[in-house]
Amino acid sequence: MDDAQRSEIGRRVKRRLKVLAAVIGVLVLVLAAVYFVAPQWLLGAYENWQARSANLEEKSVLAGDTRWVYYEGGKGPTLVLLHGYMADKSAWLPLAKYLTPNFRVVIPDLPGWGDSGRNQQGDYGYGAQVRRLRQFVDALQLGSVAVVGHSMGGAIAGDYAATYPQDVGALVLIDSAGAPFKGNAFTRELQAGRNPFDIGNRADFERLVKTTFSEPPWLPPRIEDVFVARALHDRAFDDGVMRKITSPGQSDILVGALPKVTAPTLTIWCREDRVIDVSAMDAIRNGLKHAPQIGVTELNGCGHMSIMERPREVADAITRFVLMP
């Protein structure tokens, strides 16, 4: 190779590097613009990437009075995962990738939440949600399922297992609502007539994250703004549901439901849960009069959002219990 050839190759490399630098620069500018102007697009793109990584596909179905939007993927026994208050199906994405290798996983946005339908005058208490869940299970022809519920979703899962015991092969309650527990700052806020989940700005959002996580994750400020905007938009609905599920007869719904549960039942709790104290596990164990098997998993170093802080450990506990011979 002579000097002229080497010079020509050098010029070509420089041109390609300039083009590459220009493309990267444009991409950075576009991402920066999206971050400031439409951060919800970035959040949506990240959730779509998580879903694809977990081999989940987003689907929808009309069941009863609700258009349900849900993730589905994987093969094996069917798990139905029910999210908590002010959450949606995306809350399960960190652990879903550990479940789809062994299970057919179905993760709906519960009626009223996420992208599923909402009737502003509708009843979104536990009993109404259980009836809607039955319509969803029937619409997908799921048959017997293992029902897994976190927080508010746990109370729905427990009541569902009590109402339709013949169709629930296993029940998993994670940091579940619906059972009595030792009072804490969260319950004192409720007793004072305030909703601890109400947020109106970034400071409120960060306070809530510190309450629900033992090790709060860092989020870019504009992503925090997406969650704040959602909370402000849904404030009336969220507060109405909170009043409903903390009313007499609803706040301890599992007390009456659990004695009717005939499925093997696993409870998973974080010891540092500052929303629903770990003492709720005692009430749940005492209420399971006819469950043929009761499992208990307690985790350290996490708060109320164990499904996001300890996804691998939670998924492993579910897998061992549900697949146990």
Image (tube, grey):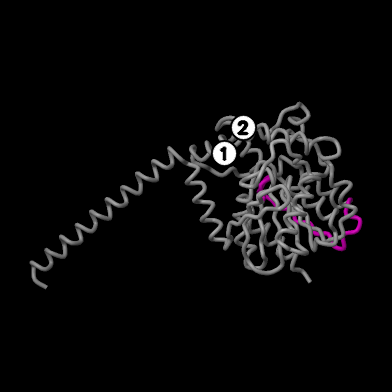
Mark 2 vs 1, N-terminal side: 2
Q: Residue at x 71, y 40 (%)?
A: 274
Mark drawn on residue 213: none
Q: Residue at x 73, y 50 (%)?
A: 64
Q: Is residue 309 visible in the rendered structure shown here?
A: no
The CA span between labels 2 and 1 is 9 Å
Q: In the picture provided, is 131 more to the left or to the right than 85?
A: right
Q: Are marks 2 and 1 in contact (CB under 8 Å)?
A: yes
SS class, disc 2: loop
State the residue position of label 2.
199
State the residue position of label 1.
227
Query: Which quarter of the rendered picture does the N terminus lie within?
Result: bottom left
Amino acid on which disc 1 is placed: Phe
Highlighted range, magenta: 287-306
- Residue 141 sits above or below residue 274 on the image: below
Q: In the picture provided, is 1 more to the left or to the right than 134?
A: left
